[in-house]
Image: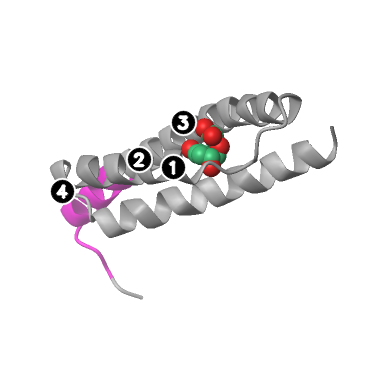
Amino acid sequence: MTTIDPSVQAELARLRDSIDNIDAAVVHMLAERFKCTQQVGHLKAEHKLPPADPARESQQIDRLRRLAESAKLDPAFAEKLLNFIIAEVIRHHETIAKSS
Ligand SMILES: C=C(O[C@@H]1C=C(C(=O)O)C=C[C@H]1O)C(=O)O
């Protein structure tokens, strides 16, 4: 088994504590975002609007890429992440539309 220097162990534990806090914040923020998008899904279904809005999505992608650049986060990664989330939201909206 590898022995880890106690000071390295302490630094690793400190960083992992922060990572755990950040992951918890991400989960809570995503939960809030999905609460909003669910409401948008119901509004769209009530008013017979399509589940996806590609014009809105491209505005969001442009904005997120700019934010990522200024935060020194890879803009391609930010775009992939947003597309992944949006695809799930659209799936929810399609389900809401079918069931209403
Ligand atoms: C939430 C909406 O529905 C869809 C999901 C989006 C999102 O998750 O940000 C953006 C555009 C739409 O394709 C919306 O139209 O605002």
The residue at the point 82 percent across, 42 percent down is 98
Say which mark, if any, is on residue 59: 2
Q: Amino acid at mark 4?
A: Lys
CB of mark 1 within 8 Å of CB of mark 2? yes
Q: Which residues are magenta?
A: 3-16
Say which mark, if any, is on residue 71: none
Quarter the C terminus occupies: top right
* 100 to the left or right of 36: right
Sequence-wise first label, 4 or 2: 2
Q: Amino acid at mark 2?
A: Gln
Outermost residue toward the right in this view = 99
The residue at the point 53 percent across, 27 percent down is 32
Residue 4 position in % (x across, y down):
24, 64
Sequence-wise first label, 4 or 3: 3
Figure check: 26 above or below 32: below
Q: Amino acid at mark 1?
A: Ala
Crowding at dot 3, Cα within 10 Å, few <14 / some 14-19 / many 20+, comes out as few
Q: CA distance from mark 4 to mark 1?
A: 26 Å
| Most frequent secondary structure within the magenta stretch | helix
Sequence-wise first label, 2 or 3: 3
Outermost residue toward the bottom in this view = 1
* 99 to the left or right of 70: right
Say which mark, if any, is on residue 55: 1
Q: Is mark 4 within 8 Å of ligand 1?
A: no
Residue carrying label 3: 29
Q: CA distance from mark 4 to mark 2?
A: 20 Å
Occupied quadrant, residue 48? top right
Figure check: 62 above or below 39: below
Which tag is nearer the camera, tag 1 or tag 2? 1
Say which mark, if any, is on residue 72: 4
Crowding at dot 2, Cα within 10 Å, few <14 / some 14-19 / many 20+, comes out as few
Mark 4, secondary structure of its residue:
loop
